[in-house]
């Protein structure tokens, strides 16, 4: 009978390490995998307020175009908002638009009607009609309809309710959207504002209520519902009084 070999713990550990496969990845490969998992972002996605400042500065910078080119100023200003939003959707971290339920779209329509009808009844003749005339001077009915249904709702919904609301509290988004409307609209109707300060205050309150409603609908029923709500509200509060 052969005597047992003396136990060598170092040799035994070495044999086990050689027999087990190496499963740990090098540190460089792990870091590379983590970097690939993180989506690339650009300045407008990580800091949407930067895009807001750019669009607001563009709106102010285009003020010398007034009153000859109001439509061009609106298109460029709202186009800047839409451009920041689209770039964020393509390259950044903006929430993707999913499939919407018909009942959510119905809620957006209902909220727009509930907000617009009372203002149309009580303020239509004395406030809304002259305000629309000053905000969109010398525009044909077709051009005004295009602005209120397509240009304005798409740009503001994508930026404020799509991009900003995913990062900020909803009431802050409502305040920023109202500030944007003031910067965009008030230079156009500056003469009327200086003459009728009470009407200007009513318009600011109305804009604030509208924007707070849009962010509420976005939070409750989704982005498409907020878009529908703004379209319906624009038609009732701004388009119908202009006819």
Image (cartoon, rainbow, N blue to C red):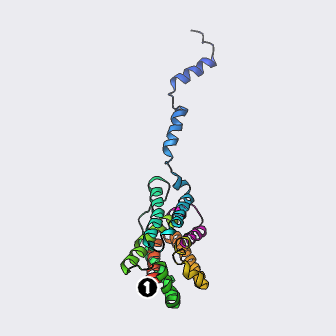
Query: Compared to 215, does 18 lie above or below?
Result: above
Q: Is residue 145 visible?
A: yes
Q: Nearer the viewer, residue 21 or 12?
A: 21
Coordinates of residue 83 in the picture (x, y in percent):
45, 60
Q: Quadrant of the N terminus?
A: top right
Q: Is residue 177 on the magenta stretch?
A: yes
Q: With 151 as the anchor, is 216 left or right in this view?
A: right
Q: Is residue 172 on the magenta stretch?
A: yes
Circle 1 SS class? helix
Residue in the picture at 49% in, 85% down: 130
Crowding at dot 1, Cα within 10 Å, few <14 / some 14-19 / many 20+, comes out as: some
Q: Nearer the viewer, residue 49 or 1?
A: 49
The magenta stretch is 162-181
Q: Nearer the viewer, residue 23 or 184?
A: 184
Q: Quadrant of the C terminus?
A: bottom left
Residue in the picture at 55% in, 54% down: 46
Report the predominant secondary structure element of the magenta stretch.
Answer: helix
Coordinates of residue 161 in the picture (x, y in percent):
51, 67
Coordinates of residue 22 in the picture (x, y in percent):
51, 28
Coordinates of residue 79 in the picture (x, y in percent):
44, 64
Q: Nearer the viewer, residue 10 or 90?
A: 90
Q: Is residue 153 visible?
A: no
Residue in the picture at 50% in, 55% down: 93
Query: Compared to 20, does 5 lie above or below?
Result: above
Residue on which disc 1 sits: 242
Query: Compared to 19, does 106 lie above or below?
Result: below
Q: How many marks?
A: 1
């Amino acid at each position: 009978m052969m005597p047992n070999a003396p136990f060598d713990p170092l040799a035994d550990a070495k044999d086990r390490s050689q027999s087990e496969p190496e499963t740990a990845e090098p540190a460089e490969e792990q870091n590379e995998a983590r970097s690939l998992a993180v989506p690339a972002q650009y300045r407008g996605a990580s800091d949407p307020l930067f895009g807001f400042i750019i669009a607001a500065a563009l709106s102010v910078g285009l003020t010398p175009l007034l009153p000859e080119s109001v439509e061009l100023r609106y298109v460029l200003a709202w186009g800047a908002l839409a451009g920041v939003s689209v770039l964020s959707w393509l390259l950044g971290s903006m929430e993707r638009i999913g499939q919407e339920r018909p009942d959510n779209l119905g809620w957006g329509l209902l909220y727009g009607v509930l907000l617009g009808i009372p203002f149309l009844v009580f303020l239509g003749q004395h406030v809304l009609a002259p305000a629309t005339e000053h905000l969109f001077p010398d525009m044909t009915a077709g051009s005004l309809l295009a602005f209120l249904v397509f240009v304005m709702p798409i740009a503001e919904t994508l930026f404020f309710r799509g991009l900003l609301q995913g990062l900020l509290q909803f009431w802050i988004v409502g305040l920023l959207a109202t500030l944007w409307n003031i910067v965009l609209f008030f230079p156009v109707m500056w003469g009327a504002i200086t003459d009728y300060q009470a009407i200007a205050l009513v318009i600011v309150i109305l804009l604030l209520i509208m924007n707070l409603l849009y962010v509420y609908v976005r939070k409750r029923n989704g982005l498409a519902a907020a878009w529908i709500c703004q379209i319906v509200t624009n038609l009732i509060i701004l388009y119908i009084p202009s006819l």
